[in-house]
Amino acid sequence: MKMKSLKSTLLLIALCGSQISSAQIGNYFDKFRPAKRWSVGLQLSPTHGMTDADNFVPGISFGAHVKYSVSQTFGLKFNADIGTINGNREDQDISGNGNEGRNGRGGDQTRGGSNTYNAGNSAPSEDSYFYKNNFKDMNVNMVFTLGNISFLRPLRKYQLFLFTGFGVVWSDARGEFTNPTDAEAYYNRWGADFFTPEYDNNNNFKNAISRYQGQNFTIPFGVGVKRNISDWLDLGIEYRNHYTRTDNLDAYSYPIWRNRVFDFYGLLGFQASIKLGGKDGITDHYDWLNPVESIYSTLDSLQEIKGKVDLLLLDTDGDGVADYYDKEPDTEKDAWVWGSGETADIDEDGVPDYRDDQPFSEKGATVNAAGVMIDEDNDNVPDYRDEDPRTIQGSVVSPTTGKAVKVGGGGCCDCNDVILPAVVFDNGSATIKPEFYGVLYSVAEKMKQCPDLKVTATGYSVKSKSGDQLAYKRANAIIDYLNANYNIPRDRFKMNAEGKASSDMEYTSRRIDLSKTR
């Protein structure tokens, strides 16, 4: 009766425990709202260089990216690009004018002897120098999604993010002067250490070529914005600037003061990203889940769980079985019920056990309103199997048929053909019921009439050690009764225990048969 109530309590504890363990083990929000983590995509990026040749000449690059979202606000992103960086010095010089050289290699337009350079003013701030760098780069960035840390507004379709990381760039840069006068002046100043000369067919100075090929460490950083288009597609734009550990991105690196600063280059990437995953009906991606929104969703889920638990614990009829499990939710007050909530009726006589005066009546017996088997002649044989339901009061009857039995068979003194009655006990009891005192009186009288008569008391039960013990106790109770009340010697009795008698009637396992010892 209490089992289902216990199950409900354990279920409540398990549900609450699952919420607590979710907050302590693994990713808290993932337990309530699993989402996609991976995205891959492509980007097309205009490029520009921030070098000594600082006049803006656009380039172009093409690349790919892969991102793993560790949480709603933090992710790791790998980028790879290939393209060109261009620039020239035709219009302006943001690095300054007229700065002194360094290392003895600044100077005027004249060249000293044997690779030495005279000090003087640096090269002019505007010239015809142009470069093109065919580059490749790779970098890994930490991405911080700002839109997912708001506590004051719901999640929107746009996300702003910042990033920084580290990487490497491979450069193949070539610079030249489109004006032969500039080319000759620079070559005369810096010589073959920095330029390779080109001449026309008339051996006139045509150009001075500079080259740089190398691999350098970079630190990318920037900002971006993207839009959630669908469950599988994002579109975005980001500006990524690269600090590089070199002044050679423009192949313009001879030692003047303006070349003291490392070069930068930037990419303005237009990106399309595909959000991978989606198994088991998962459609959301971590980048588009607000942690605060997840907390509120969790609280809503807990509230729903509480409502379900309250429903599980509801017990309308107060029988200790929650209505959710109760097959009879309207049982009477104080009724004994099974774990299913159904009213207990062990003997299946139609009278509930809680008001059954004989809860172990024989199966199939006709009972009264109190659940007691009907026995009109009070011969201890229920009417449903009593072949003579109107025997005279005090008659000795057969416990199986209910018919009167003539003790002694052929008369008061016939000691050869002896028939003795049986004694029936209550379930699990070895106490003689008062209604059998008259039966034992007739047995004692017969044994007195026949002094040589010896009696065997045979008990029946389910064959087991405890069953045999109960059968012996019942037989011994009869012998003790006859000895104590009628002075019948105990040595005239023999006790025996056998398996359950070959009958489908329950009482056969509760009787003691008395018979003449053979």
Image (spheres, rainbow, N blue to C red):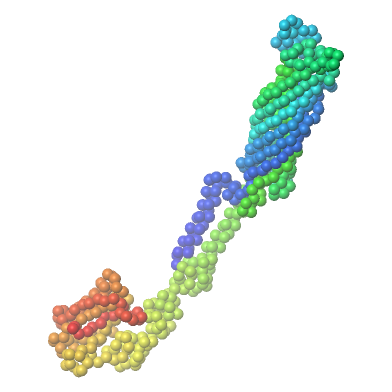
Work out which residue is located at the far right of the displayed protein and give it. 202
Q: Which of 373 and 237 is in front in this view?
A: 237
Q: In this view, does 467 lie above or below 238?
A: below
Q: In this view, does 153 lie to the left or right of 339?
A: right
The one of 444 and 498 positioned closer to us in this rendering = 498
Residue beneath the point at 55% across and 48% down: 22
Q: Which residue shows up at 35% across the image and 81% down it?
A: 505
Q: Where is residue 107 in the image (x, y as percent from the top left)?
A: 77, 9
- Residue 12, how many percent across, how many down? 51, 57
Looking at the figure, which quarter contains the C terminus? bottom left
Looking at the rendering, which quadrant does residue 71 occupy? top right
Query: Residue 100's spot in the image, x, y percent?
Result: 75, 11
Identify the residue at horizontal 63%, vertical 41% (top origin).
68
Q: Residue furthest front?
A: 201
The extreme bottom residue here reads: 411
Whether residue 352 appears in this view of the structure is yes
Residue found at the far top of this picture: 113
Q: In which quarter of the image is the N terminus?
A: bottom left
Q: Quadrant of residue 98?
A: top right
Residue 153, visible in the rendered structure: no
- Residue 233: percent from left, percent from top: 71, 46
In the picture provided, is 200 more to the left or to the right than 498?
right
Residue at 32% from the left image edge and 80% from the top image edge: 502
Please tell me which residue lies in front, 190 or 424: 190
Is residue 477 shown left or right of residue 297? left
Task: Count the marks.
Answer: 0
Residue 298 vertical placement versus 105 (above, below): below
